[in-house]
Amino acid sequence: MGQAAGAEEVPSWVKVPIMSTSGRKLPVNPGGQPAGTEGIPPLLGPVRTGNAFEETVERLLAVIKLGLVAPGERFPAERELAARLGISRLTLREAISELQQAGYVESRRGRFGGTFVTYRPPVPSEAEAARLARENAARLTDALTFRMAVETGAAEALASSPAQRADGREVLLARLAAVNSASPADYRRLDTLFHLSIAELAGSSLLTAACVDARMRMNDLLNAIPVLRRNIDHTARQHTAIATAILAGDADRARRAVAEHLDGTGALLRGFLAEPEG
């Protein structure tokens, strides 16, 4: 992914401890999100009418695959999770049992028990990326166009709202600091959290759901591509440019910064679609 044209060095405010408006250091877990369960609301709103069991499994699986709950971390308590999803605890238990049988989670009893994520994305493989690219070639351009539309719109919406920017400043900076200092092994998950936080902080559940959908459409292919330290260094400047524009309230610059960043991601993915010469 290319570096944003004219991008400045990472501002000093990215590197300082994240503080709340009261001066208290904001508790941030190793995933770069505020401590507690605040990091996963995009997918945990009430399920739609219809087959609640199937949709609950789909929602929880997306949360796991996108890394909104990291490997080894715990889902919210059963009572809270069922309330968020608007389902019975019986339906939730059935969905969790299905995911446990498939190897995505495990349930532990006792004082420190709960439902813990056990799924880990497969090790990146060029052969797997090529296979996925061939299978998804017809849909990739559509998915990239969709992602461009919703994520540039989310950045523009957040930058245009002084109240939403003020409320979300700490979370956005925490997510930015986390992804910019990520290890290659954890980069995709933290990159996802950074991008989804922009839509989430804009305050529109529909926009957030659209951004989640866009990310899921190319998640497997992204996970199959190896991440190198130089990729992280390149995109750190682009991520910083996005956050800087949003927090400055410059909606046009925020939109352009996201567009340039996503153009680089699109070019990388299309590179895996190219047929080898000879």
Image (cartoon, helix red, strand yellow):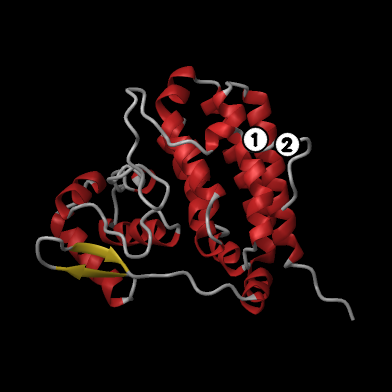
Q: Nearer the viewer, residue 231 or 69?
A: 231
Residue 56 image point, x, y percent: 30, 57
Q: Is residue 237 left or right of residue 187?
A: right
The local secondary structure at tag 2 comes to: loop
The local secondary structure at tag 1 comes to: helix
Task: Return the mark for residue 7.
Answer: 2
Q: Is residue 195 left or right of residue 272?
A: left
**Which residue sits at x=74%, y=41%?**
4
Task: Return the mark for residue 170.
Answer: none
**Which residue sits at x=15%, y=61%?**
112
Residue 275 image point, x, y percent: 80, 73
Residue closest to the far right:
278
Disc with the residue nearer the chain's start (2 vs 1)? 2
Q: Is residue 204 above or below residue 263?
A: above
Q: Is residue 20 left or right of residue 190?
A: left
Residue 227 image point, x, y percent: 62, 63
**Which residue sits at x=60%, y=30%?**
244
Residue 131 image point, x, y percent: 65, 76
Give, as a three-letter code, the residue at label 1. Answer: Ala
Placement of the C terminus among the 4 image quadrants: bottom right
Residue closest to the far top:
162
Give, as a three-letter code, the residue at label 2. Answer: Ala
Q: Nearer the viewer, residue 28 or 200?
A: 28
Residue closest to the far bottom:
278
Query: Are the residues flagged by discs 2 and 1 in contact, CB closer than 8 Å?
Result: yes
User: Which residue, given by chain and number where applicable, does mark 1 sit on?
Assistant: 241
